[in-house]
């Protein structure tokens, strides 16, 4: 009977409804007073379990809410009649078709949509990870970018653009040697040969002409820039500044891509080339697998990513460039160039004199605040140059094509001529260079065996080029031999001859 009637009292029934909350009323009298007892762990839930259940319930609610939003999006936006599909369906389809070859790298049993979603998420995490350098100080010094008044000389090019340039050394009519120097990435005409003394240039009779690449410094941008147009700019510049004889071209790092172009397209105007840590295309198809491997393994992940973006998705570079060196403040050199400098480079770049020079050069480089020239320069480094470096190799080419020329070659010597760049090529390479690895120099040595290679043990990318008087003297001595000073002006020579003639006339007896 007890089982049929259930609970004997209403208090027990109330306690069963609230799952033994621990509240007990005294006796069978009305609940004018009550006693509170601690919940028993044997039959009740702990606070931790209740909190966990609460969180789980909210997670289920949020999941259902997300499914609801997904269904709404599918029904209203992701269908053939929606504005989004009509507006972006075509471009997305084209991009999907162009990137469909990437699905070949996925396992066959994986859904491409889910797989690439995971890859994209991992890419974002990796991007965030490589942006954090654990070796850097917690508060890295930043430098404010200053604005400077225009100071360059400018020449008008045939296409209507203005090119800014800077001259150092002796005057044009007394120059024994003329040097023309294109600058590297994130640099300007102010670099030239950093820290070279005016007295040293005069001692060797050198006229040094540096210029701003299109869109850098005070030079106007070029709407369709390539390496051929770069060589033509050099040709127009030397003609405008009265370089009448053959000139030497001097370059450092990525500025050497413009020197390579000049050697290829205007070789008749160039006497020789002096290249310090010359850059080549890191995707050059003629590099061996070993050379390619030893080149890429020297770079930080961020630098590798920048090259990959420049080759595949150059428009994405604007985000990183605006963040790193185009704002009002910029960071240290190793972060700007995404490099890990060697021991000697680190010592050089920490010198106050270097920091001051570098700061002024960067400020001039970004003067216009335009991101496009920097993207163009990065793309030029990794895209098809339109020629191969090995084409500069000096070799004999004979004309034997055609039946008449072939018959003629059987009875007489074929008409042959030397092809390639016939001038001198001197290359200096630091063996501790982390920006342009020595493997690039080894590739150049292999395809251009006539080039003179100067291997520099313990030197880095900047240590032999920036603010080194002894290094500059060694370079000039290698190129020009014993210093002979500037040449005498023709007017001074003619005046000297006239004075000698007058003296001879006075000495003749009447």
Image (tube, rainbow, N blue to C red):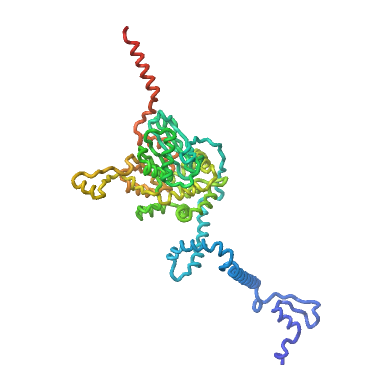
Asked if residue 144 lies left or right of residue 28, the reply is left
Q: Is residue 174 in view?
A: yes
Is the C terminus in the top left, top right, bottom left or bottom right quadrant?
Answer: top left
Give how far across and how far down residue 286 sits, in percent.
35, 52
Q: Position of residue 506 (x, y in %)?
A: 35, 11
Q: Which residue occupies 42% across, 65% down?
A: 104
Q: Note whether residue 467 is visible.
A: no
Q: Nearer the viewer, residue 277 or 387?
A: 387
The correct choice, above or below, for 203 with respect to 373 in the image is above
> Number of marks in the image?
0
Outermost residue to the bottom: 1
Spot occupied by residue 315 in the image (x, y as percentages of width and height): 50, 53
Which quarter of the figure is the N terminus placed in? bottom right
Front residue of this view, candidates 263 and 360:
263
Residue at 26% across / 49% down in the picture?
401
Residue 59 image-quadrant placement: bottom right
Location of residue 273 (image quadrant)? top left
């Amino acid at each position: 009977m007890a089982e049929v009637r259930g609970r004997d009292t209403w208090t027990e029934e109330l306690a069963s409804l609230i799952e033994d909350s621990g509240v007990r009323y005294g006796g069978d009298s009305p609940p004018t007073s009550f006693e509170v007892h601690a919940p028993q762990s044997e039959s009740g839930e702990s606070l931790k379990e209740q909190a966990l259940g609460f969180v789980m319930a909210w997670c289920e609610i949020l999941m259902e809410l997300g499914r609801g939003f997904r269904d709404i999006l599918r029904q209203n936006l992701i269908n053939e009649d929606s504005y989004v599909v009509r507006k972006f369906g075509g471009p997305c389809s084209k991009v999907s078709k162009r990137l469909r070859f990437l699905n070949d790298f996925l396992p066959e049993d994986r859904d491409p949509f889910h797989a690439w979603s995971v890859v994209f998420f991992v890419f974002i995490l990796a991007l965030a990870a490589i942006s954090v350098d654990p070796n850097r100080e917690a508060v890295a010094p930043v430098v404010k970018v200053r604005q400077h008044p225009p100071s360059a000389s400018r020449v008008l090019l045939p296409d209507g653009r203005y090119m800014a340039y800077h001259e150092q050394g002796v005057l044009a009519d007394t120059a024994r040697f003329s040097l023309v120097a294109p600058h590297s990435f994130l640099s300007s005409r102010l670099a030239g040969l950093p820290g070279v003394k005016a007295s040293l240039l005069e001692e060797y009779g050198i006229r040094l002409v540096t210029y701003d690449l299109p869109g850098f410094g005070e030079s106007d941008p070029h709407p369709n820039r390539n390496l051929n147009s770069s060589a033509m700019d050099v040709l127009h510049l030397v003609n405008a500044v009265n370089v009448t004889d053959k000139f030497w071209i001097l370059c450092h790092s990525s500025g050497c891509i413009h020197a390579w172009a000049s050697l290829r397209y205007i070789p008749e105007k160039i006497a020789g080339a002096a290249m310090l840590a010359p850059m080549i295309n890191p995707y050059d198809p003629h590099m061996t697998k070993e050379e390619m491997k030893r080149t890429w393994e020297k770079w930080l992940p961020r630098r590798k990513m920048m090259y990959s973006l420049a080759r595949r998705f150059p428009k994405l570079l604007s985000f990183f460039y605006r963040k790193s060196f185009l704002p009002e403040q910029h960071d240290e050199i190793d972060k700007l160039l995404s490099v890990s400098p060697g021991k000697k480079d680190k010592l050089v770049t920490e010198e106050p004199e270097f920091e001051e020079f570098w700061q002024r050069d960067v400020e001039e480089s970004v003067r216009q605040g335009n991101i496009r020239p920097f993207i163009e320069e990065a793309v030029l480094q990794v895209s098809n140059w339109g020629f191969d470096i090995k084409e500069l190799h000096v070799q004999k080419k004979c004309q034997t094509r055609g039946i008449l020329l072939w018959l003629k070659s059987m009875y007489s010597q074929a008409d042959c001529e030397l092809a390639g760049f016939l001038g001198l090529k001197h290359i200096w390479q630091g063996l501790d260079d982390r920006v342009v690895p020595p493997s690039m120099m080894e590739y150049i040595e292999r395809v251009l065996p006539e080039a003179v290679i100067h291997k520099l043990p313990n030197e880095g990318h900047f240590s032999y080029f920036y603010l080194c008087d002894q290094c500059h003297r060694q370079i000039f001595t290698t190129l020009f031999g014993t210093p002979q000073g500037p040449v005498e002006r023709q007017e001074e020579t003619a005046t000297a001859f006239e004075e000698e003639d007058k003296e001879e006339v006075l000495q003749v007896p009447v």
